[in-house]
Image: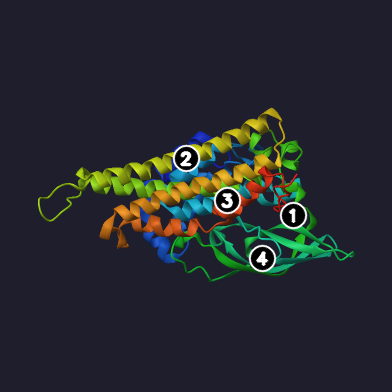
Amino acid sequence: MDDMTDDLNGAISASGLVEKARQAVPFLRERADEANALRRPPEDVRAFMKASGFSRLWMPRRYGGAEGPLRAGSDMLRELAHGCGSTAWITVQNALHNLMLANWPAEAQEDVWGRTPDVLVSGILIPGIGKATKVEGGYRLSGRWPFVSGVEVADWVIFTGDCTGADGKAEELHFVVPKDEIEVLDTWYTIGLKASSSQDVKVNDVFVPEHRTVTDAALKGGATSPAAARYEGACYKVPPYSIFGCFIGSAALGIAEAAVDHYIANARKRAATMAGGTSIASYTTQQVKVAEAQSAVLAARQLIYSVLDEAERLATSGTPTTEEDRTRFRALAAYANKLAAAAGATVLEAGGGGVIYERNPVARCISDLTVTNRHITQNWDVNASTYGRALLGLPIENPMLQD
């Protein structure tokens, strides 16, 4: 894969990253069995992830990033998922956390990106788990967090923790911590996304300097965000929590697309019945199921594109998003996931006995989709109810989507 790497100190382009992801598919498929057995990317895959620049898509140009368009992220992640769903899943975290870090103070950005732009940043933003205590010059952070995807290949990790002030009120803060200051717990034994290294992580009274901490308000995005004031890219003006589901959903969609592609390729060459040797492809039922599955993934892709294009258009024009906009973006991303999941289910139903074998690539796709669908941004009921409240003029309960 050496011919696909950039000079880390040189320019990087969003279109180039999408093309690299497309070219990487055979390599990632070749390494997928070992990755699943290890429950993390092998060292050569980790080295490729760092050198490829995928995590730099929304990193500021000042530090060697692309400040790329939103749609490029969807395309890049879908292509990676065609090769390995777990690698795509980790890359979602790497790219999105770099996007978020653009809102941290400049000193923190120097800490993380200053020496080299190839760092991989993992993290988890579940509130109410971590506890922080204010001390001179910063905070002391403790806690245990689950689902920290890619943590074993990461260089830095972002956590959320509550800090209780003298008035007794807890303030939710976000911390970025070097990987060597955390403890990774061996908990990731799952039915899918086995190589995503989504282990539990424990932090025990670690000092985090003040400049490596931000408030919720700094991460809500929009034209007044710290990143928007500092950098030119439209990606920094979009409320990030409203579009996270599009990128997590793009990795899931890429897995579904791979399942459909694998099935179509196999059905074209497979002899069907023991009597007559009629091709599977000649059966109307198979034709209908293949068309249904392909239509579902194509529709999901267009739905995600529509959200990202609208979010970027509003950001570029300087038009603030409303609560209805933000909840709609989340809901439509979750609905796209319903379509992708339906495509996977259709392929599973059409595949017969062949898809139960681990050697069948469709089986791995279905297992991975089972796990991706558990992510909160992909949960239709949760995100639809929030959108419904906004449509009905009721207050929404997600603070990161509120005005």
| Residue 192 position by quadrant | bottom left
Name the N-terminal-most of marks 4 and 2: 4
As drawn, which residue projects farthest toward the left? 276
Left or right: 210 with respect to 90? right
What amino acid is at disc 3?
Asn
Task: Name the residue: 46% across, 64% down.
Answer: 39
The span from disc 1 to disc 2 (Cα, nearest Å) is: 36 Å
The total number of labels drawn is 4
Mark number displayed over residue 369: none
The span from disc 4 to disc 2 (Cα, nearest Å) is: 39 Å
Task: Name the residue: 39% across, 40% down.
Answer: 295
The span from disc 3 to disc 1 (Cα, nearest Å) is: 17 Å
What amino acid is at disc 1?
Arg
Q: Residues within 10 Å of mark 4 (few under 14, many from 20)?
A: some
Give the SS element for disc 1: helix
Name the N-terminal-most of marks 4 and 1: 4
The span from disc 4 to disc 1 (Cα, nearest Å) is: 14 Å
Observer-nearest residue: 285 or 145? 285
**Depicted 299 relative to depicted 88: above or below:** above
Mark number displayed over residue 212: 1
4 or 2: mark nearer the eye: 2
Any part of residue 248 in sight = yes
Give the SS element for disc 3: helix
Name the N-terminal-most of marks 1 and 2: 1
What amino acid is at disc 2?
Arg
1 or 2: mark nearer the eye: 2
| x then y, percent, for residue 400 | 71, 50
Q: Which residue is disc 4 drawn over?
A: 181
Task: Name the residue: 71% across, 31% down.
Answer: 319
Q: Which residue is disc 3 drawn over?
A: 94
